[in-house]
Amino acid sequence: MANSFPDQLAAGVRARRGSLRLSQRELAELAGVSERFVRFVEQGKRTVQLDSLIALLDTLGLELRVQTRTSPAARALAGPRAHELPGHGEPEDGPEARP
């Protein structure tokens, strides 16, 4: 899969390192990780240590974000929205409040 997350991450790290004109060794030293780790990230290796990855991204001025997906499959997993469920969106106090 050409657009997998590891592949996108690898391309982003390679591009940013290149724009900063850093060698893999220089980046590794600045981030406090091994040159081998930098190479693995840039190759899209599927298993990397998260703390080392965050240090590497931080050094490059990049960040890792977790966002809700907008794909149909992700929406299906999320189920109905809370305001669409019966009993939600009604006032908690007042004459229509339930006992």
Image (cartoon, grey):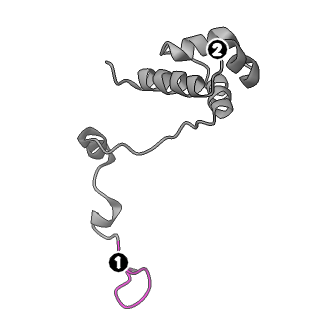
Which of the 4 image quadrants contains residue 31? top right
Which of the 4 image quadrants contains residue 1? top left
Please give the name of the residue rendered at 35% of the width and 77% of the height, measured from the top-left corner: 90
Residue placed under numbered mark 2 in the picture: 24
Q: Are marks 1 and 2 in contact (CB under 8 Å)?
A: no
Circle nearer the viewer, 1 or 2: 2
Along the horizontal axis of the image, is 17 left or right of 3? right
For marks 1 and 2, give the CA distance: 57 Å
Q: Position of residue 28 (x, y in %)?
A: 70, 17
Please give the name of the residue rendered at 64% of the width and 14% of the height, measured from the top-left corner: 24
Residue placed under numbered mark 1 in the picture: 90
Along the horizontal axis of the image, is 7 left or right of 57? left
Q: Secondary structure at mark 2?
A: helix
Q: Position of residue 82 (x, y in %)?
A: 34, 61
> Relative to 67, does residue 50 appear above or below in the rendering?
above
Q: Residue furthest bottom?
A: 95
The reply to whether residue 23 is in sight is yes
Disc 2 marks a residue whose amino acid type is Gln
Marks 1 and 2, the one that precedes in the sequence: 2
- Observer-nearest of 50 and 41: 41
Magenta range is 89-98
